[in-house]
Amino acid sequence: SIPLTCNLTGSGYLTVNGTDNLYGIKGSLDIPYTVAISNLRTSDYSVLEGQDKEIACQWSHSAVLGSQPIPINNTEIRVRLIKDGNVYLAKDIPYGVMEPGSHFKATTLSTHNLPIGAYLLRIQIIQYASEHVLGTVEAIFNVNPASSPTGGGGGYYPTPTIAAFNIPT
């Protein structure tokens, strides 16, 4: 095992230099790698103002070194709600070591301080030591006005008035 001193990002070749123990012949080996995820997806969401909303995303991890699947270290999920170019909510979720295969992650967003309106929900999966973006997905996140409670008064109900009427004689 040879420890790496930095993250592998994107795709390329990892060059391993060494010396043969028996004859002392120096040489190198180039191993192709790809550090990637695929099929990152989420859904559109709607929530009533002031309520919490659970959101989720799922993806497949497809990183390989040579032909061997490898884990991706130092990963994080970044969730942003954006409107008119401004970030209204930011949540970073440490994910740690991402093993090969399919993944699912859910988190709850608090909308207590968000104005009513439509937001861009952006979810990114990154390697946080290098800030390399592994994948991005975007969806719509609507914060809708809370509806008026049913019953209980407080509403305006006009008082009926009687205009002229005829009484048969």
Image: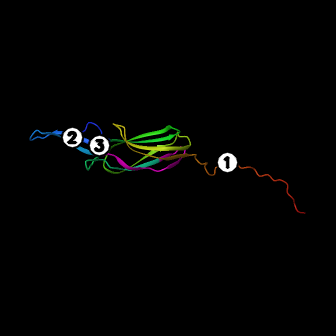
Task: Say which label, 2 or 1, has the lower sequence index.
Answer: 2
Task: Residue 89: give x, y in percent of width and height.
Answer: 48, 39
Local crowd size for mark 2, using a 10 Å CA cut-off: few (<14), some (14–19), many (≥20): few
Residue located 70% across and 47% down the image: 156
Q: Is residue 167 left or right of residue 51?
A: right
Task: Residue 155: give x, y in percent of width and height.
Answer: 67, 48
Task: Say which label, 1 or 3, has the lower sequence index.
Answer: 3
Between the C-alphas of marks 1 and 3, the distance is 67 Å
- Secondary structure under badge 1? loop
Q: Which mark is residue 155?
A: 1
- Secondary structure under badge 3? strand
Q: Residue furthest bottom?
A: 169
Local crowd size for mark 3, using a 10 Å CA cut-off: few (<14), some (14–19), many (≥20): some
Could you say which is closer to the camera, residue 57 or residue 166? 57
Residue located 56% across and 43% down the image: 117
Q: In the rendered structure, which amino acid carries the disc numbered 2? A: Val
- Secondary structure under badge 2? strand
What segment carries the magenta color?
Answer: 33-53
Q: Is residue 110 left or right of residue 64?
A: right
Q: In the rendered structure, which amino acid carries the disc numbered 1? A: Gly
Q: Which mark is residue 16?
A: 2
Q: Which residue is mark 3?
A: 12
Residue located 35% across and 47% down the image: 37
Could you say which is closer to the camera, residue 103 or residue 110? 103
Q: Is 64 contained in the magenta span?
A: no
